[in-house]
Amino acid sequence: MKIKKNKILTLVNLGGPRSVSEIEVFLSDLFLDPFVFDLPLPEFLRQKLAKFIAKKRAPKVAKKYESMGFGGASPLVSETERQAIVLQSTLNLNSEFKWKVQIAMACGYPNIRDSKFSKPSPNEIYLPLYPQFSRSTVLSTYNILYNKFGECPIGSGGIVPNFGNDPKYWKLYADFLIEYFLGKLNEKQFLHYDIYPKGKDWREMNLVFSAHGIPMRLVKKGDKYLEEVASNVKGIIAQLKSKGFKGSFYISFQSKVGPAKWTEPNTIQVIENLAKQKKDIAVIPISFVSDHLETLEEIGEEFREIAIGNGANSFYRIPAFGVYPKFIEYLAGIVLEADKKATSCVCLELGGQSLDQCRFKNRANS
């Protein structure tokens, strides 16, 4: 009997508090990250301000988590664990290797900085669960791994690149949306599921693709996130139109924090405008693959209230993928490829800068 070679896959997500006591820890990790809380300040001042903001915001954030009904915690960690379990089973059924799939969070626990997480390699693979590249998500993850291991992970054979602009992903997303509108998804696999009524024509729906916003200062530094989101949506819409979609679609951004200028238009503005026209509205969490605070509370509750309060004919929150079978199968396929095709500095191309010890830095700057 042939013994299968072991491989470890780590799913990386932003993170969320697993209990009320972890909220301030989660926020501290978030704001201490220089690629997330990016301010033109000396580092010691930036860190001091980050800790102050985390402590000040914790009580307010706690109220939002409490309203979701998960004991004052975020479901993101447990949702990512569910994805890991199903993905491990899928990989072991469809691969010559024996896979162990675990999870790591950039903020909170289990923390990607812990010693249990090994250096990226063909046998220690990391999959950041962010469809689009941004300095505040993908580049931040690469930087954490760089600081831990002394080299950028791109080109190590142990990183799965962001996947939002893969045509296979566009088709997958279109299939998912159509299955939702036709009532073919397994409702039990999703949190706070909105049932789409039979008889309502999805082909005439107003689709709002809501992405997590980022400060415009990141875009000015070279972050191609806006372009990534736009290209992603364009590909999905093309697939939907091939299946008969004739409605309207919009790209917007949510979750703005602070007074600085962020990506626009804001999702609230788009929803208010459509609602006043008595439209049917479906909001799609285009930058999220696991349900959590932004999808369940912000979209599912706050945006719904705004839509209905302003006269919307109907409002639907499209769920994040979670353990949707076609999504898990897609992830398994791209994991088996890892970053075998890496030939240039994606951090520079999509994020505006190379990390130190980049394997492609000289080539990128030549």
Image (tube, rainbow, N blue to C red):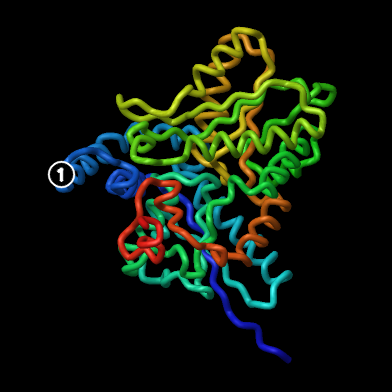
63 left or right, relative to 297? left
Q: Which residue is mark 1?
A: 42
In the rendered image, which quarter contains the C terminus? bottom left
In the image, what residue occupies the spot 70% across and 89% down? Answer: 2
| Residue 295 on image: x %, y % | 54, 35
Extreme-bottom residue of the structure: 1
User: Between 280 and 291, which is closer to the camera in this rendering?
Assistant: 280
In the rendered image, which quarter contains the N terminus? bottom right
User: Between 12 and 186, which is closer to the camera in this rendering?
Assistant: 12
| Residue 284 on image: x %, y % | 61, 32
In the image, what residue occupies the spot 78% across and 25% down? Answer: 203
Q: Is residue 270 above or below residue 76?
A: above
User: Between 68 and 2, which is closer to the camera in this rendering?
Assistant: 2
| Residue 235 on image: x %, y % | 66, 38
| Residue 46 on image: x %, y % | 20, 42
Crowdedness near tag 1: few (<14), some (14–19) or many (≥20) residues, C-alpha within 10 Å: few
Number of marks drawn: 1
Question: What type is the residue that disc 1 sits on?
Answer: Pro
In the image, what residue occupies the spot 40% across and 46% down? Answer: 351
Extreme-right residue of the structure: 199
In the image, what residue occupies the spot 84% across and 22% down? Answer: 199
Q: Quadrant of residue 195?
A: top right
The answer to whether residue 298 is seen in the rendering is yes
132 left or right, relative to 35? right
Q: Quadrant of residue 192?
A: top right
109 left or right, relative to 246? left
Badge 1 marks a residue whose secondary structure is loop
Q: Is residue 257 above or below residue 92?
A: above
The answer to whether residue 18 is seen in the rendering is no
